[in-house]
Structures are given as structure tokens and as C-alpha cells.
Amino acid sequence: MKGLVRREFWSFGFIALFSFLFIVASFPGNVDAQLTLSASPPSSAPVGTSVLWTATSLGEGYVYRFTVKYQSGRELIIRDYDIYYEGIAWTPINQGQYQVKVYAKAGYDAVSGIQESEVSYNITPAVTGKSAVVNPTQHPLVALYSIPAACFANKARVQFRAAGESEWQSTPYKQCSPYKTLNFLVAGMYPETTYEMRHEAVYFLGRRYSDTQTFATGALEDGVTIPALQVLNEPGFDSSMTDGILLHAFLFALIIVDQVPQQILTGPVATDLEGNVLWYYGDAFLPQYGGSFMMSFPTFVGGTFFMPMARPSAPFPLRGQLLREIDLAGNTVRETNVEIINAQLADLGFNPIYYFHHDVRRLPNGHTLVMAGEERVYPSVPWAPEEPVDVVGDMIIDLDENFQVVWAWSTFDHDAELRIGTIGPLRDGPCIEAQPGFNPCGPLRLLGTGDGQASAAYDWTHGNTVTYTPADGNFILSFRHQDWVIKVDYNNGRGSGQILWKLGYEGDFESAEGPQGPDFWFSGQHQPMVYAQKELVIYDNSNIRNEPPVDPVAHSRGQVYLLDEENMIADLIVDADLGVYASFLGSAQKLANGNYHFLSGGIGGGVVIGGFPAGSSQSTEVGPDGSINYTLQSIAATYRSFRMKSMYQPAGIPGDIDGDSDVDGLDILEIYKKLFRRADIPYDLNGDGWVTLEDVSEARSQCTLPYCRNLYWETPVIGY
């Protein structure tokens, strides 16, 4: 191995040191106890009821898995094997008969002696008459709209608007059923506001609209603190107003108490472009889940959200131990954890991970790519004075529809191809506990003085993004401490894991303008996103340009590259000066009108609290010429922000007519239908007010797959 000489002495010490935190598999509890499962309330609760399922405790060391099967469908995991038996909340929004089951075994690694208990549960309709009804959910800003059975239309959706407004917003369509009610979570509403709601039924020969219902949203829950937001640049005529929601992954905010700066934990919040609250995820604000944040937006219509949740523990929450998928009401769709994932990784011959971090990506086939941290102890490394050293790398894990491991990729298998110099690890320094219970590198397990541990740790790669490239079925990764974006041969789970190329200074691509120094390329970057097969949008933190000798005007940049992968040429077509320097955090995104959204997430404010420069963040929209036409500032450090069309759909992309988050032949056909007519976005791509062949050509250039083939998304697998 080049540069890194590995010493394998972690395994026995690791198990001895940490098994007491989670399992004592050698000493299972009462093996004679009988596993049972109970529900509160009992069977025959209406749609939208939160049902608490509780299993009997079999004793210390046992772990429990909860699953659900809807009628004759497949068995789906709600929460995989974990130490919790006290209960799991399950909130179904479809009527019918369910089979709920709990499994228990003596430790995460156990393969035998598994007990199980199953209960049948009936969910009754929330509406029994001939008119739709609207009910509140556990979320004060989310409603449950129920359409009666005997819906003979092809499909239906809910439309809603604030009382007195003229424009309707819409949920995604659902297929109607003549035998069962149709239920929708309605989200994207202001607090303490009265809304009008109706449903639209689409028939073969037309549409029909129901009578209007009213619904009043509630106030924000206690403990939900929204960081102050301020518009610095109002959106103008050239802003992407169809992408009118901002989803903020707030981390922490700086407040002043008795003239002393303090940090408060915050969580994911959605606002309009003026900063008015539309949605939030309440669990992330709870102290027991401190350090939990949202990682990604829905990648298709009606998608869900992913959260790496902290594990409640004493004396401090352990960050990133749970991976949770939630719906708009905050209900858990499915959940897994580090320990059961490690048991599955061991079966595939991989080392353990220690936490989930930074990014999750749902794939068209229903699988999920998640980024996780991996540690290995080495006798020495070239860029660290300490010996031995806990080297922190990254792993990408492919989870199937039930959050089971099917494929994995580790940076440590490619150390000869990644930088071993001083670029990243020494830029951010060693992984030191910044405050009790919090290490910026996560809850490291091999940092310490015990057997198999090292007294110093360094974050070697610092992965922060995994992005799927549908044109070839591979993915790209952003490594902040490498100042590189790399592409990996994933091939939809059949790939070799080979690194196909590296983009950045001293990488495999040459600039279209000829050889360039490090200041030309991105550094410390975040969230590269790929559009139209070859357009890469990325947030350049510009760390290198702010290292000695410091350039006083070296702001962070929003960059867009056109990649010619055949000739290995990168053409920098947008290099927007964002007007501020964010040394860490950030995101990037393309918008429906061809503009770009960038987040400067960690703008230093001169005060360091908890190991981070406590300052502000800015969500900025820029045009293709790099000009800024909208800015919203927050007092919170923000991991990412995303523009969205609605709470159900991410920002559109030019040419996406049907709103399915890709551009394909069906979209081109819809543009042809408007040819030589007056139209606006999304049909008019060049902004001249007419649909012409130029718009058709531009839409073709934006196609997601070669030859404008359709990109099909599997129906989300949800156990309710």
C-alpha cells in the first residue's frame, strides 16, 4: 500500500470496549420469556391514528425488529433490529388489514434462536359519508385529507390555498379506488392560518372538483426555535419563482443571552422565499436527538426525507447512529441503525462503520445509497506527527427497499489512488472533542487510550456527497479533504468499485482553458449535482484561496462545469462570486428556469463555539451569467438548503414538463404540442414568450438519459 501502512489490531479491542454500549449477547436475558406484541389503541382505529406497538422485554442484550405487511403485500421493515422494545409509533394512512410482527434475538450478530410474535390489525376509514373530510395530524402544519370510497375517476389529488388567495397548490396524484378511501398528507402551509381544500378527480373525458373544506393550521410546537431569516436580495423577474420553497437543514443558531453568545440546536425547516415557516421536523429539535439534521431532498414526486438521527443515550446523544426515513407528518417510514448494518457488513467482508453522515440518495430502483464513517488505526501516516493514528475514511452503502445491505464501497480499498498529503486532514486539524460529547468527526470508536485505539485521529477524506448518475448507473463522491470529486463504477450495484476519474486540481480532467493552478478549481467543496448527463453544479467553499497567503476577496463560488468524459475536458461555464466566504458547509442545485441555487452554509462570525465558527448562512440564486438575483440570510449555520416546487417535489429542471424530476421523450412531446404558441416556463426554455424549435432543441440538451429515454422510478416502498 502506498503511503498508508495499515496495522490490523482494532478488532478484539473494539468489540471488548464497545459491546457494553449496545449488546451483551453472551448474557441474554430470560430465555424462557415469551415474546408478545400489543397495540395501543387496539385494532379498528381510523386512518391517521398513531398506533404504539410494544413488545415484551426478553432481557438485557436482546434486539427487536418491527415489520408490517399490508393485506397480501410484502413484509416491510419499519425498524430493524435494535435495543428498543418499549414501542414504535406506526401511523398508517391507508385503510385495510395489516399484519404487524416483532422479531427478537440475543444480539445484533445472532443468527439463531429468533423469536417472533404477530398481530393482525384493522385500519378503518376516516371518512364514512359521501363528502371528503379533513383531519389534523400530529404535525400542526400538516392535514390528512380523506376522499370517500367509490372514487371511480382515474386519479385524484388535493388542492389547497390560504383563505382569500386565488392560486391553488396541489399534492401529487393518487390512483382512485371504488372500494377504499383515498388519503393525502397536505403540507406546505403557514402556521395559524385557515386554508380551503378540495379534491380534483380526473376522468377519461374531463375533471370534476369537490366542494371546498376548510382547515386551520396550528401554532409551532414548544421547543421548535426557528432561526431568524432576512431577505438581502428580493427575488426579481429573472428569479425561479416556480421553485418557491426553501428547505433549510439548519444545524445550530447563534443567539445572545445576557451579552454572551450561545448556540442553540435547530432542525430542518421549510420556508417560502421571504423566510416564512411552512414546515419543520419536530424530533430534530428535541435534546435527546441533538445533532440530527436533514441530508437530502426528495428525488421524485411525493418522496420522503432522510435523517441521520442521534441515538438517545447518557450522558450525551450519539450522533448519526440511526438512519430514519420520514414522511411529511414526521412519521417514521423505516429506520435502521449502525449496529445492525455492521452485522450485515461483516457478512460481506467489510469493516464496521461508526456513524451515518452527510448524505443519502434514493435511487430509481428503490435502493438507497448512504454515506458512513469508517475508522482504521495505522502505525503512522505521512501527514500526522502522532503514532499510531486513527485514520477516518468513508464508506458508501447500498441498501435495498428494506434497508438491507447489498453492496458497499470503502475509501480504504483505494488509498493508493487518493491523496495522502496534507491538503485536508491538516487543514481542519485533528479530530478533537470540541465540547463534552461532541467531536466534529463524529462519535469515534477507535480514538482513545484503550487496546486497539489511537490517541490521535484525522479525517482523511471527509466525504460529504454521493450523487447518482443515471446516464451510466454510477455515482460521484465529493471528498472535501481531498479537494476532489471522484466517479465510482457502481453500475447499479453490479460495478467493480473502481475509481473511474478524479475531478479537481491534479485530477484527471484538464480545463478547457488549458492547465490551471489550484485557485481555478474548487476546494473544500460541497454537493456536486449532475444534470443533463454532463453538467456538474458544485459549491466551491474556496478553502485553498483562503489559506496563507490569503486573498482578501477570495469569496466562495458557485461553479458549473460541462464534463467531456471521453476526452477528459472540464469546461467551467459558471464561476459565480457569492459575495461571502463560507469555510465549511454548502450546497448546489439547478432550478427550473436555468438559474442555480447555492448555499453558503458556514459564514464565520468571529466567535467560535463548540469547535465551529458561529455565524450565519446565505441561500443565493444566481443566473447563468453569475449575477445574484436573490439572497436569504439566516443566523444559523446550515448544512444544506434546497429549493423545491412544493413539499412533494424538488426544484424543477429546464424541460421537465411532467414534473417527474427528469427530462425525457415524454417531456419533449409535450413541448412539441405547444409549438409556435405563446407559453411560459416550463415550455418556454429561452424566455422569449414563445415555444419554438429552439426550445425543443434546448430541452433535448437537458435529457437525463441518452436518446432522451424515460427514467422510471419504482413506487416508494412504504409500510402503511
Image (cartoon, rainbow, N blue to C red):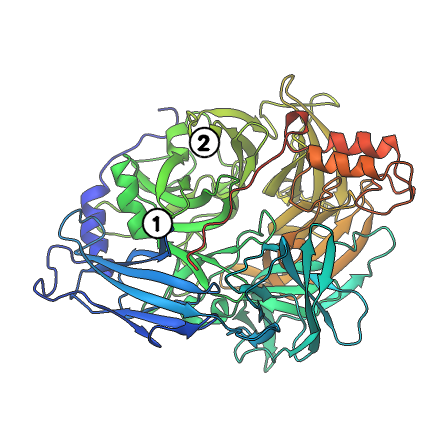
Give residue 546's quadrant in the image: top right
Residue 172 visible? The answer is no
- Residue 183 versus residue 705: which sits nearer the camera? 183
Give the number of the disc on residue 168: none
Vertical position of residue 413 compared to residue 670: above or below: above
Q: Please state if 201 lies on the left or on the right of 363 as rendered.
A: right
Where residue 157 sits: x, y (%)? 64, 60
Q: Please state if 644 lies on the left or on the right of 298 as rendered.
A: right
Spatial CA span between label 2 and label 1: 22 Å
Residue type at the position of mark 2: Ile
Residue at the disc numbered 2: 420
Where residue 139 sits: x, y (%)? 54, 73
Vertical position of residue 705 compared to residue 97: above or below: above
Which is more N-terminal, label 1 or label 2? 1
- Residue 591 versus residue 299: which sits nearer the camera? 299
- What residue is at 13 percent from the left and 66 percent from the top? 34
How many labels were placed on the picture? 2
**In which quadrant is the N terminus drawn?**
top left
Where residue 23 sits: x, y (%)? 20, 58
Q: Please state if 199 lies on the left or on the right of 70 as rendered.
A: right
- Residue 442 versus residue 248: which sits nearer the camera? 248
- What residue is at 53 percent from the left and 65 percent from the top? 181
Residue at the disc numbered 1: 354
